[in-house]
Amino acid sequence: MKARNLIVIVGLTLLACSAKEVAPPAPLLPIPSQSQLAWHAMEMNAFVHFTANTFTGKEWGFGDERPKVFNPSQFDANQWVSIFKAAGFKGVILTCKHHDGFCLWPGKYTEHSVKNSPWQNGKGDVVREVAEACKKNALKFGIYLSPWDRNHKDYGTPAYIEYYRNQLNELFTNYGPVFEMWFDGANGGSGYYGGKREKRTINGAKYYDWPTTLELVGKMEPSIIFFSDAGPGVRWVGNEKGIAGETNWNTISSDTLYAGKGGIEKLLNTGSENGTAWIPAETDVSIRPGWFYHKEEDSLVKSGNKLFEIYLTSVGRGSTLLLNVPPDRRGLLHENDVAALKSFRELLNTEFKINLALNAKTEASSFRGKAKRFSSANLTDISKETYWATDDDVTTGSVEINFGNKKIIHYIVLQEYVALGQRVKSFSIEIWKGDQWQLATQATTIGYKRILKIEPIETQKIRINFTAAKVSLVISNIEVY
Ligand code: FUL
């Protein structure tokens, strides 16, 4: 072998060894499960509230609505789902049963369902059609099954819990795969209850025996994400306005929480820095004032601009947006809602059109073990699986991104590599102006994604200063628009 070749081989081996020596950062517990990671990446899902209420004009049916009121004239689940897909949603969660107990599938455990409605001569199945439309459009399908049932005669007794679990069984064995299961927090109160027409109070912390129910569902659908105020998969964001916490930790201590427990909205909105479980916030909000369709709200559909604002305060704050778009009495998404979704999509497309940071030159204050695989170049590559990381004892640092020439910038997008936990507590963004750095904005948490909107400004480079973190920094992505 020639001496030169030998030198090259030795050199390469030494390089490989030194790279090998630099271990990746240890995860900061708690970390998300694989299904939670997949859920984060979905970013936007659609919520569909549709039931007897659509025809009676109510928001909370009493439970005495006759099934025959349910009669959409032009029902088309494919219209809903293809519009959701075009708008960029990745999943659809359907109210298979709302508080009135009316079931959108012809199950065998109750007569209070589509099977006794004139729609498709009692042979229709909304759940089936939506699940199939989701499959056809490659969107994931989710189930909302209200625990509170104002129709059922046994509500409040153990017999109802058995009924509820039977319904879950039916849904999960016949309509899966299901990515998310929504356990609503509204619990107990007055209702029809098989004709008793009375008030029934339940102990929210105990009555449903959630651990047993979750185990049952988990066996049928191991990767299911459970939504409730308190998780365990994802938590409620604490309001129905589309606003996640400006500080938004994916972590929270869930041992004292339960679905329907009041007075915890603020905590749910921000999570807690030292929470013991990974339970990210889901931001559910309706495109209309109500959750169900009401003709008199046709003029009150949120505009594309408003939806974009909500996108920034939900997805842009590390949460997932669950946007409710209720079909009308025809069984179609109303023209006004469709127009708003279209304008929302157009805004997303124009505002985030060209990522000025893609492959831009970066320079970091330091990087882990000086190993290339942890360098700041990973921030502006196309992959979200590569990341910039610092040494274990380095919890602050900065990264400069140089666009090569002057660009007008409006938004900065940051992502932590949350598979290794949520770390950043605060950061600031500076813009190069004249011959010095000028503060553009500062914020607290990042999490899965943080989008900061700044006053549009022309600049050749920006600097992001990570000013505090729980442990060393692990950032996977920076985009600039
Ligand atoms: C609430 C319910 O009471 C509303 O009707 C709606 O379903 C909303 C998503 O959750 O708790």
Image (spheres, rainbow, N blue to C red):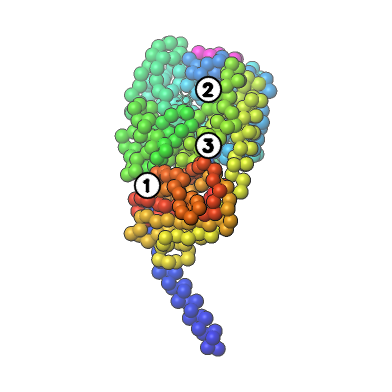
Amino acid type shown at disc 1: Lys
Q: Closest to the observer: 246 or 122?
A: 246
Distance, label 2 to label 3, CA atoms, is: 17 Å
Check disc 3: other Cα within 10 Å, few if <14, some if 14-19, many if 20+: many
Task: Tell whether position 23 is magenta.
Answer: no
Which numbered tag is attached to residue 425?
1
Q: Which residue is mark 3?
A: 311
Q: Residue at x 45, y 76 (%)?
A: 14
Q: Residue at x 46, y 28 (%)?
A: 240
Residue 206 in picture, x, y percent from top left: 33, 28
> In this view, which residue lies farthest toward the front?
434
Q: Closest to the observer: 412 or 102?
A: 412
Residue 476 in picture, x, y percent from top left: 48, 54
Dividing the picture into quadrants, the one containing residue 214 is top left
Indicate which disc, 1 or 3, sits on the residue closer to the N terminus.
3
Picture quarter with the N terminus: bottom right
Q: Residue at x 41, y 48 (%)?
A: 427
Which numbered tag is attached to residue 289?
2
Dividing the picture into quadrants, the one containing residue 259 is top left
- Magenta segment, which residues? 63-70
Check disc 1: other Cα within 10 Å, few if <14, some if 14-19, many if 20+: many
